[in-house]
Image (cartoon, rainbow, N blue to C red):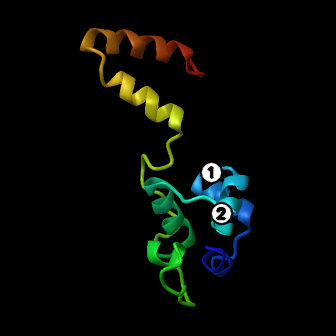
Amino acid sequence: MKQARKRAGMTQAEAAEGIGIAPEVYERMERGGVLPSGPTLLRMCLILGSGPHELMGFAEVEPGQSAPGANTVPPGLSDTPEKRRLLRRLARLDSPRIKALARLVALLLPGR
């Protein structure tokens, strides 16, 4: 991870921000004290422009360019745990309750 991060020209804090995790967690991952979850590993691959085999230490990080679009995180992967929990709960609501909730959210949004 450290080699890939340095090749990408990032600090630990910048990498952590791009991945969407706390800098302290990223530091522990880079030292090998914590393993990333699947979605976090995918975001790391995209942000650092390396494959999972390289980031997990199974292959050497090749010098050179990052993969095209390496800094683009697909929609949904950057969601917070709170947002994912809310979406799972919303999926269990029936149509009338979703409509009522949508009206409430519209009232809470700025610019109305």
Measured as percent of width and height from the top left, residue 64 is found at 56, 89
Examine the image and state in which quarter residue 26 appears: bottom right
State the SS at label 1: loop
Q: Does residue 110 appear anywhere in the picture?
A: yes
Above or below, comparing residue 63 to residue 68 in the picture? below
Callout 2: 10 Å neighbours few (<14), some, many (20+)?
A: many
Quadrant in which the C terminus is drawn? top right
Camera-side residue of 47 and 112: 47
| Residue 15: mark in rendering | 2
Kindly identify which residue carries mark 1. 21
Camera-side residue of 28 and 50: 28
Measured as percent of width and height from the top left, residue 1 is found at 61, 73
Which circle's residue, 2 or 1, is located before the other in the chain? Answer: 2
Camera-side residue of 96 and 103: 96
Q: Disc 2 residue type?
A: Ala
Examine the image and state in which quarter residue 84 appears: top left
Q: Are marks 2 and 1 in contact (CB under 8 Å)?
A: no
State the SS at label 2: helix
Residue at point 53%, 73% (across, down): 55
Measured as percent of width and height from the top left, residue 110 is found at 60, 22
Cα distance in 3D space between marks 2 and 1: 9 Å
Residue at point 32%, 10% (across, down): 97
Q: Is residue 47 left or right of residue 90?
A: right
Above or below, comparing residue 93 to residue 36 in the picture? above
Q: Disc 1 residue type?
A: Ile
As drawn, the residue found furthest toward the left would be: 95
Residue at point 37%, 9% (across, down): 100
Measured as percent of width and height from the top left, residue 89 is found at 38, 23
Callout 1: 10 Å neighbours few (<14), some, many (20+)?
A: some
Residue at point 26%, 14% (across, down): 94
